[in-house]
């Protein structure tokens, strides 16, 4: 089976996992972010992500780091991943809560 490059990296060097602090969340539009917690009612993952180049008319080289959230039931979550050999500590499984309600969409990580 032939994979796009980002999927090749995931398939051969990572494995799917339950969420934990620092887990990589992969979105259906090929973007990734790091899970840092969950919202107050525990219905969404809170994550940080960003871009290192300009977008939509912004100056090239612009760096943006976003904090946002996505419903745990969203079909836009492709996978939650970790490096294959990474051992998750019990403390990392305890997701802290944050008052972040902005819902993720294609533009919030661009």
Image (cartoon, rainbow, N blue to C red):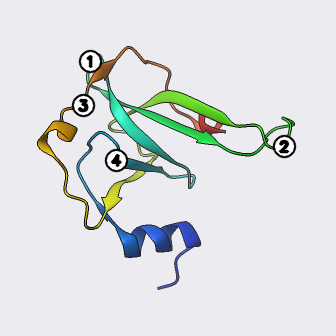
CA distance for labels 3 and 1: 12 Å
Among numbered discs 1 and 4, the one appearing first in the sequence: 4
Among numbered discs 4 and 3, the one appearing first in the sequence: 4
Which numbered circle lies on residue 41? 1
Q: Which residue is drawn at 29% across and 20% down?
A: 97
* Residue 87 in which image quadrant: bottom left
Among numbered discs 2 and 4, the one appearing first in the sequence: 4
Q: Mark 4 points at which residue?
A: 23
Viewer-nearest of discs 2 and 1: 2
**SS of the residue under disc 1:** loop
Q: Where is residue 82 in the image (x, y as percent from the top left)?
A: 32, 57
Q: Residue at x 86, y 37 (%)?
A: 59
Q: In this view, does 107 lie to the left or right of 42?
A: right
Decide: marks 2, 1 in contact (CB < 8 A)?
A: no
**SS of the residue under disc 2:** loop
Crowd tier of the residue under label 2, counting other residues whose Cα lies within 10 Å: few below 14, some 14–19, many 20 or above:
few
Crowd tier of the residue under label 3, counting other residues whose Cα lies within 10 Å: few below 14, some 14–19, many 20 or above:
some
Q: Mark 3 points at which residue?
A: 95
Q: Where is residue 49 in the image (x, y as percent from the top left)?
A: 53, 39
Q: Residue at x 24, y 31 (%)?
A: 95
Q: Residue at x 50, y 21 (%)?
A: 102
Q: Name the residue under label 2.
A: 60
Among numbered discs 2 and 3, the one appearing first in the sequence: 2
């Amino acid at each position: 089976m032939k994979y796009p490059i980002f999927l090749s990296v995931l398939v051969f060097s990572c494995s799917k996992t339950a969420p934990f602090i620092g887990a990589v969340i992969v979105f259906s539009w090929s973007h990734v972010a790091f899970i840092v917690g969950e919202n107050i009612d525990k219905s969404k993952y809170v994550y940080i992500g960003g871009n290192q180049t300009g977008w939509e008319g912004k100056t090239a080289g612009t760096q943006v780091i976003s904090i946002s959230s996505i419903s745990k039931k969203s079909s836009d979550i492709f996978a939650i991943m970790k490096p294959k050999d990474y051992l998750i500590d019990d403390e990392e499984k305890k997701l802290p809560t944050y008052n972040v309600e902005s819902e993720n969409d294609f533009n919030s990580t661009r």
